[in-house]
Image (spheres, rainbow, N blue to C red):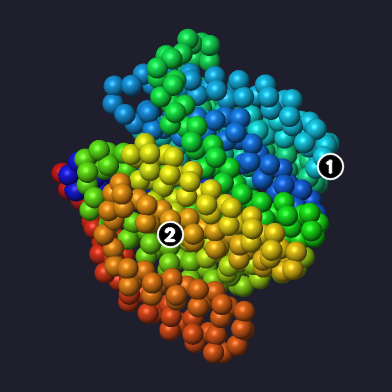
Amino acid sequence: MSKKKSLNKLVSNTLIFAIGSFSSRILVFFLVPLYSRTLSTSEYGKIDLITTLISLILPVFTLTIHEAIIRFCLEKNTDKSQILSIGLQTIFIGMIPLLIIMPPLLKFLNLENLIWYFLAAYIFTALKQVFSFFARGTEKIRLVVIMGIIDTVLTIVLNLIFLLYLDKGINGYYYSLIITGLLISVIYYIVLDIKPNTLFKRSNIILKKEMLLYSLPMIPNSLSWWISNSSDKILINYFYGASLTGLYAIAYKIPSLLNTITSIFMQAWQISAVEEFESQENDNFSNAYTFLFGINILVCVLLIIFSKTIARIMFSSEFYLAVNFVPILLVAYFFNGMSAYLGSIYTSSKKTNMLFISTMFGAVINIILNLILIPNYGGYGAAIATSVSYMVIWIVRLINTRKILKLNFNILNHIFDIISLLGIAFVFYFDNNITSLFFKIVFIMLVINNNKFIFKNLYEFLFSAFQKRYIK
């Protein structure tokens, strides 16, 4: 694919995902004040534990089949309906062992009264995942974005009804989650024109084997990401209880804004990356990486600088102390985003084994540091452990992916940016006039350092979009 055509496609998809993601994620972000005012820290901690548990078991019982769906659908001359059929069969077969294992597990966690909410939330999450990845794989990008917006609007409306108007508390949260999941799954089923016999279609054994060989190594990879993402919450709950878990969980809401930037780009890049890899356009991989690195650094620093202001607006007084965990978690999310980009090299080349190995390496470090730091330092220890583990994954992938595809970037600029980011995160905890001056100086230096890489590419992105829209 030519550089111009590649850029046009990436820009077009990025802008489409940006419209959907910003509208969806920003609106959901503004639900935080609702949660912090209608739920206690303990209730929010229980909600986060259920969400965390679903994210743990989903890749295990679905065999991460959604990843194979998008990858194989993007290939030319493939039977798309057969791919979807294999995906749906996989998630429903996975429900059998799930129904056996989950009741005693939830009882052990003292969450047995939420079992039906859990099972309903799980199945609709799995269905939405399969349908949305199938839509992306068949390049129905606008549909994915529209469905994301509908999902968000339904979530907000139902949360307002059940939490604010009907005052249903934690049960109301799950009512809104389940009803939204059901409606979105039904809409996808209708709009994608899925045939009633798709679930029961006889599988192509060769295709099924290829898909599973691709997706199975991603199960331990997903579990490793879960360890890095969520094991800290389990240990905080064990050592300190649900209240601190709730504080720590809501602290993630500000870093999630940085994750929005990364996910917008990665959703578009995931589609382009396969074609770029097949055409061996290494420069496009390098340019995209450098652009994402610079954007993430600047957004991360800005969020650290303004995190206290954001927290005063979004968090109730009961949750405000969560802001202390935010700078460290923002550093973690920066490395998480850059690791995700490097992961696209593994998925594009279908070499998913190293995807698992690198993530597992970081997960082991995360567990060790969690066990050392959380008992003594609580949420701070958990945040530090998460940041270190993500940084390790990024470093390992940065070195290892050179065997597949060599990225060209300025290592000295990388080092300067990372030291500046860590410096701002550290200085955050010293609230005085010198802190404010330090923030301003470092941010200006980062803008200057990344000017060539960000604004040059941003200009090309915007000009390409304008040219595609208005110049024939």
Q: Residue at x 44, y 50 (%)?
A: 340
Q: Residue at x 58, y 67 (%)?
A: 328
> Which amino acid type is shown beneath numbered disc 1?
Asn
**Whole-percent x and y of residue 29?**
59, 55
Observer-nearest of 345 and 119: 345
Residue drawn at x 26%, y 69% is 452
Q: Foreground residue, 351 or 144?
A: 351
Viewport quadrant of the N terminus: top left
Q: Is residue 107 above or below residue 425?
A: above
From the image, tell me which residue sits under label 1.
Answer: 110
Q: Quadrant of the C terminus?
A: top left
Residue type at mark 2 is Ile
Q: Is residue 328 left or right of residue 280?
A: right
Point out residue 251 in the picture as x, y percentages from the top left corner: 65, 61
Any part of residue 156 in sight: yes
Q: Dot 2 corresponds to which residue?
A: 395
The answer to whether residue 147 is seen in the rendering is no
Of circles 1 and 2, the one toward us is: 2
Instruction: Assign a secondary structure to mark 2.
Output: helix
Residue depicted at x 78% and y 37%: 106
**Left/right of residue 305 with respect to residue 344 in the rendered view:** right
The local secondary structure at tag 1 comes to loop
Give the quadrant of residue 118: top right
Residue 307 to residue 248: above or below: below
